[in-house]
Amino acid sequence: MEKTHWRKVFNSDYLGSCDLDEGRDLKLKIKHVTVQEIKGTDGKVQERNVAMFTDAAIKPMILNSTNCKIIKKFAKSAYIDDWNNVAIQVYIKDDIKAFGEVVDGLRIRTVQPSFTKPKLTPGVPAWAKAVEFLKGEGTMAKVKAGYSITSPDEVLLKAAVI
């Protein structure tokens, strides 16, 4: 049975610690970062950096200065316009001191994750799905976007579609 975090009922538009399973990191790729006006818990509106992710199912994340410094290091640039396609790994830190309390929040790991594509070879179950995909409206470019495939295997895949 799945448990419900108490903060889920507040239905935030932004990624929060309640959106991650306890103890589970989230590997993400930043699509882009924008500056947005965000209303804080005190009701004041302030400009904040907000990361949007390539996975549209993941809510945007408000970036604090600690997280921005880590992304800056990964991107080798202080400019948010250069942070597109930067891979990050988000986790819950449960001992953050803020507003006179100890709270939990999202932090970015200081080691950048790698995103490796699974290999597509004739012996894996995804091979048959790729053949069906290509027989329909699918393209080889879309297959290559999700899988790593060698040139000889690409020739075999194309031959299987005919």
Image (spheres, rainbow, N blue to C red):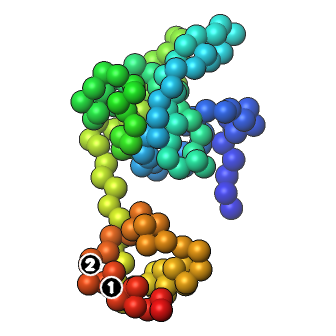
Q: Nearer the viewer, residue 85 or 46?
A: 85
Q: Toward which corner of the image does residue 68 lie, by quadrant?
A: top left
In the image, taking residue 80 as reference, residue 58 lies left or right, namely right
Could you tell me if residue 106 is visible in this image? no
For label 2, the crowd category at 10 Å Cα-Cα, with few meaning under 14, some 14 to 19 and many 20 or more, is few
Which quarter of the rendered picture does the N terminus lie within? bottom right
In the displayed structure, would residue 124 be above or below residue 89?
Answer: below
- Please tell me which residue is depicted at 64% across the width and 10% down the height of the picture: 45
Q: How far is mark 1 from mark 2, CA to CA? A: 6 Å
Q: Where residue 88 sits in the image (x, y, percent)? A: 37, 42
Q: Please name the amino acid that badge 2 sits on.
A: Ser
Q: Which mark is residue 155?
A: 1
In the displayed structure, would residue 144 be above or below residue 129?
Answer: above
The answer to the question of whether label 1 and label 2 lie on touching residues, with beta carbons closer than 8 A, is: yes
Q: Toward which corner of the image does residue 29 lie, by quadrant?
A: top left
Q: Please name the amino acid that badge 1 sits on.
A: Val
Q: Nearer the viewer, residue 105 or 61?
A: 61
Name the residue beneath numbered marker 2. 151
Q: Nearer the viewer, residue 48 or 100?
A: 48
